[in-house]
Amino acid sequence: MTQQILFYAFAAVLVASALAVITVKNSVHAALCLVLTFFTAASIWILAEAEFLGLALIVVYVGAVMVLFLFVVMMLDIKEEAVREGFIRFLPVGVVVAVVMLAEMLSLIGVRALQAVPLPENPALAAGSNTSWLGKALFTQFLLPFEVAALILTVALIAAVTLTLRKRGGVRSQKPGQQVLVQRDERLRVVKMASEAPSTGESP
Amino acid sequence: MISLTDILTLLPESFLTLAICALLLIDLFLKPAQRSVTHYLAIIVLAVTGWLVLQHFGEPTAFGGMFVRDGIAAVLKVFVLLTTALVFVYARPYLRDRSLFVGEYYVLCLFAVLGMMLLVSAGNLVMIYLGLELLALSSYALVALNRDSPLSSEAAMKYFVLGALASGMLLYGMSMIYGAAGSLDLNTIHAVAATSTQRGLLLFGVVFVVVGIAFKFGAAPFHMWLPDVYQGAPTAVTVFIGSAPKLAAFGMAYRLLESGLDGLGGYWQLMLALLAVLSLAIGNIAAIMQSNLKRMLAYSTISHVGFLFLGLVNGQPEGYAAAMFYAISYALTAAAAFGIILLLSRAGFEAEEISDYKGLGQRAPWYAFLMALIMFSLAGVPPLFGFFGKLLVLKAVAVPGTLWLAVVGAVFAIIGIYYYLRVVKVMYFDEPDGEAVIAGPADAPMRAVLSVNALALLVLGLTWGPLYGWCAQAFGIVR
């Protein structure tokens, strides 16, 4: 009972904050609402006894990705009007499409169909802890997908470097390697000249 | 658990992975002038991987059914590798002229090949998704390779956003199927789909999976990204994403629909039939209006995808074999067609308008002849390769019940001939205007390979039996 009340409370917060992400005017507020969305989703996962996934969501998304995201949003200084353009104009169409889709989905599968299929036994229960089962599954049953995911991250890394690293013209940068090799006569020129009598200050 | 046999079964993929990592490091120590070393090493890597694919060792499945090594995967992999090798040869002069001749092009292409190989061998929904993402992420980066071109960046952005949307659709469908079947393994899903009495949830998942497949193929009405990406990407990248991934997409569709959801065939076959007819109509009619050759070939791709879907519609081994034959013939022909564009382009000039080909018959008779062969093959004129692809696909659907599809296919094939022949007409009967375009500064290996590729369309058209036999054998058809 408590679990159900908690679930509906979290779900309500989740949906409300997700809606806020796309409706609030200020993009910093939107990013903060997204943080709330992630946090609530993590709570729901923990409620469903997936502690590791919930914590990973908080650590990775809330802790790292969203902070970076907020940083970028603050740096970019996005004009609100430009982003909002067309939002009100397309809103009726969007609402109609969403309502039609929801009605279709409910009529096709309904809530009952989801409950009709018995879920397989939770394998984590047998292992004791969710985290240790996940760790074992990743390195035995799902070893190949795990490795392929690593390859995907490698591709992301290579692509990011390829697309952002470039040599710009007109940038002044120091070259320490050349700086330390400098010779004395490149910096200082000793000029020989005939000695002159100190002037007396009188004009000739 | 994981044993040495699993690794042995995965040897081609493992070798390719290690070779890519080695290539990435070797490339780091090369001077820009020595970049050809990367080029030749990449081709050698492809050749060795192809040889390993054809060896018979290991088990039919590995990693607990995650990875399937069967005849279908072998045929598709061999042609993915062959097409990519052709792409590398064609792309080199173009990349060099535009200071895009970097090691990352080869590394990203090879990663995409690895993704395709895993995709066509997937025995699990997770593997299908991961293979697809490996292919897609590499493709996005490749399209954006020419950062200074606004057209290229726009294409990459569109490709990325729509590709992400398609992945979302596919994942949503997969999650529904998982919810209904209680397993990610395609064999288990196959068993559940065949016996399940409550099919609502499964069917709901099937709809999204089919949408995801159609997006990745570029079938109408999910084709919007295709013309922009083909036109916007550097031609050296277009030749890659326009050829080999079609083979992988066929593999993905086969694994998902036949290996996984065969029990719901009656439903998805109707969806595919609708997508096929729409693709044939939109692709062929929109292609007539194009003045840009790359855009025209993009719309032609959409119509060819329609043909490919026709082969899948009946859910019979003959149809699958015909569709695979079609995918192979399309990949080889598309590689050659974009190869000609690459050949005629030079620094500061892209030979991508159809009017750039005016009078090519006088200026470069040999390449005009090759281009004519390629166009005839795409149009499906006998006795070229493309004709037999179309013939086999139409034969597969020309059975009672789906006869109307064969008629629709034949009608649109005839409409399609118009715009292919227009290119031939421009080459032979139009006078060159303004500055005469001569064949660009392509290197000798490219000219030779391109000639062989185009002539192979004729030779394979005349002797298509063995190749079709190989495809049929992969699907267990006794001939």
Image (spheres, coloured by chain):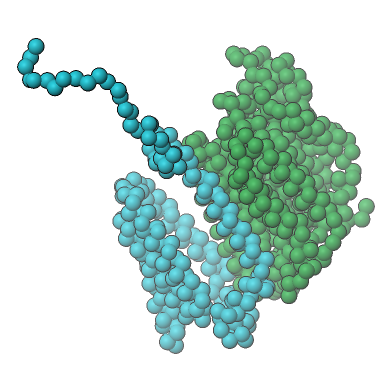
Near-viewer residue (B78 or A113): B78
Give percent across and percent down for residue A56. Answer: 49, 71
Residue at the right extreme of this rendering? B479
Query: Residue at coordinates 59% horizontally, 82% vertically from top-left?
Result: A124
| Quadrant containing the N terminus of chain B in the rendered view | bottom right
Please give left or right for residue A50 compared with residue B194 in the image. left
For the question of whether residue B51 can be seen, the reply is yes
Please tell me the colour of chain A.
cyan
Quick check: B228 above or below B168?
above
Query: Residue at coordinates 62% horizontally, 82% vertically from top-left?
Result: A123
Quick check: B470 above or below A68?
above
Please tell me the colour of chain B.
green
Give percent across and percent down for residue B257. Answer: 71, 60
Query: Residue at coordinates 69% horizontally, 55% vertically from top-left?
Result: B18
Please identify the quarter of the rendering in which residue B65 is found. Answer: bottom right
Near-viewer residue (A77 or B448): B448
Quick check: B399 above or below B36?
below
Please give left or right for residue B379 compared with residue B172 in the image. right
Give percent across and percent down for residue B466. Answer: 90, 45
Please identify the quarter of the rendering in which residue B385 is found. Answer: top right
For the question of whether residue B154 can be seen, the reply is no
